[in-house]
Amino acid sequence: MDDAEANILASLGRVRLCDLAAADGLPSDGYKMCVSALTQSLAQYSAAVVELPPADGALLRSGLDSARLFFHQRGYGSGEAGGGSGDAREWCKTSGYYADPQMWLEIYDFRPGITPVEPNGVAELPPSGLPDMFSVLGKVSREVLDAISFSLNLRSSTFTELLDNIPLRSQEVSSSVLSACCHSRPSMEGTQQHSVASQDDEQLLMFSDQENQIDKTLLTLVKSDRSGLYIKDLHGRWILVDGDLGPLDIVVYPGLALYRETAGYVNPAVHKTEVGNLQECMFGRCSLVFKLMPRSVARLSGEEMRAAGHGVDAQFQVPILVNDFMQTEHSANQLFPKNNEPSPHVEQEASYNFVMKRKKEGRKTKALPPSKRLRLEAQRVLKERVQDIADKKGIKLRFCSLRDCESHIKSLDHPCENIRTEIGWPPGVPFVHPHDLPNKAKLRFLEAYEPGWTASQQDLEVGSVV
């Protein structure tokens, strides 16, 4: 691992589960610091590390040992390939063993409420300890979800309506699932084909065919016996997130359902798994993956975000049934535009920087019209001041439309009030992108974040005349 990767690993938010436990009354400083570390890590790296209590950590390590033995003793057959999750309509019914040869992956799904059976009708014997681990990881995921709701200023237990009952009622089947996974087991057919690549180059990493995977979960929790999980960070870099974990640590990352329910304020993790360089390991790479899923009959609407005062884009304002959401294709390219495509704001900023450079060099340039100069300055302040404040507080900026914001800005409980207060947005100025503000509002915006801006511009004009 190089120095850059080591620094990034050290920067991942690490919190203890005991510090995430909410209590009645005012939040303690320790709780607020813990939530801040968690949410900032999710915002920057789309992942965080949670330290479990010793008893829970020992249970998961025992579960990994059991999973290794389960897969090692089980012979792989091509007839079992793809038997678990090929049909999107069956997303909440997967259970038992199945394999995906294209990803060099074998899975055993444990879903409370379903008893898996072998093709001959005999009940399947699962890895041991799955019910206990399901209970532990379910509790961890709900604690993390509550911490996220606190950071977004949502009511406590906001996501309860989306989740299964605790405990499940009679005849109910769990929406969430615990998967024991095994990557690149040598006895799996076809693994000899991908082992050739690393024989000549020990530094060559190999990944499964699906490199841009996004889980349709609320949260995903992962505990592995070997590193190999990569997640894209805020800047589009692939980060190894499980390369420096302690025996009690697990990785947690958000999924598409949480992204949809929070109106885009919590980005889903784009991830991939290394499957090469395991030729000498007879067990492959084993993992326990808990997926906290919403109920199929629930709706993702973003209503709680609007109620808390957050601006909600039009694409999140139409409620969607979870079952329909799960059957809809979602592409990483659709959710996150490529970084190398320059936006109009970037081009405007580049133009402004060029003009200022020419002025500093003493060359004659045509003065920018006042309206264009205001527009470019507002864009600069947004990037240098406002975005910096938002990033430090883990806030994702979602601006209102000018017409809507002008209509509700004078009300006592307008929906963007909380986020305006958090970032110090000037009173009376609509919460829209500064590029779209009227000129007078732009001036108030600039003065709010750079006091004395108007006077400095007047001095600049006098200097240029002299």
Image (cartoon, rainbow, N blue to C red):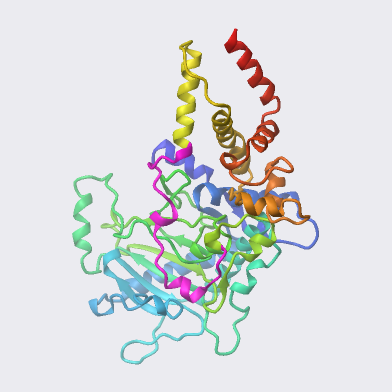
Figure check: 38 above or below 110: above
Asked whether 122 falls inside the magenta stretch, the response is no
The structure residue drawn at horizontal position 59% and vertical position 72%, both measured from the top left corner, is: 162
Give the residue drawn at x 44%, y 71%. Answer: 179
Q: Does the rendering let one see residue 451?
A: yes
Which contiguous range is marked in magenta? 317-345
Relative depth, front residue between 163 and 386: 386
Q: Nearer the viewer, residue 208 or 163?
A: 163
Between residues 240 and 364, which one lies in front from this camera angle?
364
Image coordinates of residue 379 in percent, x first then y, are 55, 35
Between residues 293 and 95, which one lies in front from this camera angle? 293
Q: Is residue 340 magenta?
A: yes
Q: Residue at x 54, y 52 (%)?
A: 42
Q: Is residue 99 left or right of residue 453?
A: left
Residue 29 image position (x, y, % from top left): 74, 49
Marker count (numbered): 0
Q: Is residue 340 above or below residue 272?
A: above
Q: Position of residue 454 (x, y in %)?
A: 67, 25
Horizontal relation, residue 24 to residue 82: left or right: right
User: Extreme bottom residue here?
Assistant: 121
* Residue extending furthest toward the top: 466
Residue 331 drawn at (x, y percent):
39, 60
Question: On the rendered image, what quadrant is the N terminus found in?
Answer: top left
In the displayed structure, 395 sits above or below 373; it is below
| Residue 129 visible | no
For the C terminus, the quadrant is top right
